[in-house]
Image (tube, rainbow, N blue to C red):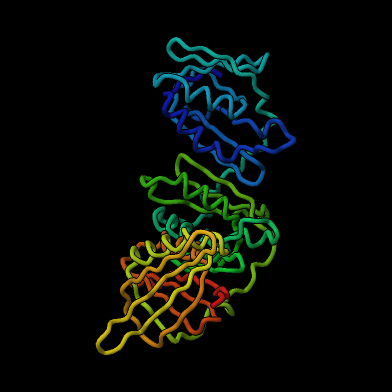
Amino acid sequence: MKVSCLQENLAKGLSIVGRAVSTRSTLPVLANVLLATDNGRLKLSATNLEIVVTCWIGAKVEEEGAITVPARTFGDLVSALPQDRVDLALNEQTQTLHISCLRTEANVKGIDAQEFPLVPEPDPDDRIRVQTDIFRQMISQVAIAAAVDDTRPILTGVATRFEGSQVMMAATDGFRLSVKSAQIPGLVAEPQSVVVPSRALQELARVATDDTEAIYISLPHGRNQIIFDMENIVIVSQLIDGNFPDYTPIIPKRKITRTVMGTAEFLKACKTAEIFARESSHTARVQIDAGDEITPGYAIIAATSNETGDNIAQIDASVEGESVEIAFNVKYMTDVLSVIDTPQVALETTTAMEPGVIKPVGDNDFMHIIMPMHFGR
């Protein structure tokens, strides 16, 4: 293998695939990144066996070949090189990669590319097209509710369903639930439901750039995998086995109070409350006052800590229904308010003991449900 490419392109490619490198595997090759020539480009690939990230960068290929090199060593080295042309030459007998850039030279010992797991190919004939910006927004609004511990592996995933011209996503950790739907161009021939690891979707949102117009999704039959194809980047993820719990009973069927607030103002009040709520399981009180004919409605977000103090923030609100006081995990509130991009947000509540529903005003495709917390008087 004899290849030349630009340092900044190589560094960017390594940052894209780098997060898929395994840090705790007994297989040494999984700590490596695969470098391989591919149709006049340089292909970079990394995997931890749960997710595979591959990207292609422009390169001048003089000799074909492939090698895997330690991801951390090679990544640190490339980052330290000057912004110029990098020449890579492989000594196949010693499986050593020679790197040179201006007046810097290095040799990195590798492992034969044959030992690297086979990277699945996307199927160009059977795939679903989604708009990148829409899909990224879906991921940001839903993945926040997925569980982070593996006690119930199914809850670390995002239930994803493709049906007709719609995609729907849902995630829950048992304390909150996010549900989002969106239209997709074209029609899905057969409805398909899968549970995608939240980590894989967050990785996809990280590497999908604004100039990528579309993401193509394929679900190869019998492989328990999902493939996301974005021109120069492909992500392959294992799916999570099992049945995602039916979350429809959690969704409140009625509301007694609907409170509309400015999203930025509500978020700021919740962030302030979080400073004092840290020591009390992130509990903050949300007090909704409907007002009267003379006094407009308002909301108070308050938190108390025995150790550090307390705070109260009052914000303007348009309230339909009765006054109510309800306690929430304020960290969950800031998580969801941070991913809502409408100027106003609605909080729908029934009683202090029942879940609250957060909806962006003017966007009927997203809802976030938060279970209430108990608070002492």
Q: Is residue 206 left or right of residue 47?
A: left
Question: Which of the two residues, 150 or 245, is positioned nearer the viewer here?
Answer: 150
Which residue lies most toward the right here?
A: 26
x, y percent for residue 90: 59, 17
Direction left: furthest residue: 294
Of the pair 152 and 133, the residue shown nearer to us: 152
- The residue shown at (43%, 77%) is 287
Which of the 4 quarters of the picture holds residue 256?
A: bottom left
For the N terminus, the quadrant is top right
The x, y position of residue 208, in whole percent, is 44, 46
Is residue 174 positioned above or below 254 on the image? above
Query: x%, y% of residue 19?
Result: 56, 40
Question: Number of callouts in the render?
Answer: 0
Is 141 on the left-hand or right-hand side of 313? right
Quarter of the image for the C terminus: give it.
bottom right
Q: Residue at x 65, y 38 (%)?
A: 22
Residue closest to the eye, 61 or 145:
145
Residue occupying the point 35% across, 82% down:
319
Q: Is residue 184 visible?
A: no
Residue 107 makes an appearance in the image? yes
**Which image quarter: residue 26?**
top right
Residue 322: x percent and y percent? 41, 88
Identify whether 259 is placed above or below 140. Answer: below
Q: Nearer the viewer, residue 353 or 76?
A: 353
| Residue sticking out furthest to the bottom | 293
